[in-house]
């Protein structure tokens, strides 16, 4: 299994190296604060990285909302269980 992981990492590194070689041309990156000349591969990897980071943050926000809702529902279920137990312990009065 460890050998397969090493082969997979090696393949990813080779694909990355080929990507960098094929996109080695420099391009101008215009942003709000200035202009920078960088290789196209660096800009593309940066854009993919920023996109992945934004995706992780969006997923994290959704996950935190769901965890909070889950905790609220667990608390409500606990209160309801306690109420049912209290009602069961009250003796029934015949009229």
Image (cartoon, helix red, strand yellow):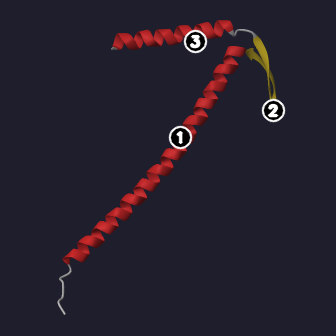
Residue 76 drawn above or below residue 43: below
Q: Residue 64 in the image: x percent, y percent?
A: 49, 48
Among the two numbered marks 3 and 1 on one chain, the one whose residue lies closer to the N terminus: 3
Mark number displayed over residue 14: none
Q: Residue 37 in the image: x percent, y percent?
A: 78, 17
Using the image as rendered, state which of residue 46 and residue 1 is in the foreground: 1
Please tell me whether mark 2 or mark 3 is closer to you in this view: 3
The span from disc 3 to disc 1 (Cα, nearest Å) is 26 Å
- Write down the residue under mark 2: 32
Determine the residue located farthest toward the bottom in the rendered image: 95
Among the two numbered marks 2 and 3 on one chain, the one whose residue lies closer to the N terminus: 3
Residue 11 drawn above or below residue 70: above
- Write down the residue under mark 3: 16
Q: Residue 19 in the image: x percent, y percent?
A: 62, 10
Residue drawn at (63%, 25%) of the image: 48
Q: Residues within 10 Å of mark 3 (few under 14, many from 20)?
A: some
Q: Quadrant of the C terminus?
A: bottom left
SS at mark 3 in the image? helix
Residue drawn at (25%, 76%) of the image: 87
SS at mark 2 in the image? loop
Residue drawn at (69%, 10%) of the image: 23
Q: Residue 43 in the image: x percent, y percent?
A: 70, 20
- Write down the residue under mark 1: 59
Residue drawn at (17%, 90%) of the image: 94
The span from disc 2 to disc 3 (Cα, nearest Å) is 29 Å
């Amino acid at each position: 299994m460890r050998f397969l992981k090493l082969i997979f990492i090696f393949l990813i590194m080779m694909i990355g190296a080929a990507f960098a070689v094929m996109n080695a041309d420099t391009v101008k990156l215009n942003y709000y604060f200035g202009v920078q000349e960088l290789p196209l591969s660096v800009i593309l990897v940066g854009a993919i990285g920023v996109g992945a980071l934004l995706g992780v943050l969006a997923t994290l926000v959704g996950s935190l909302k769901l965890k909070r809702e889950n905790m609220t529902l667990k608390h409500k279920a606990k209160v309801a269980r306690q109420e049912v137990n209290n009602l069961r312990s009250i003796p029934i009065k015949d009229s």
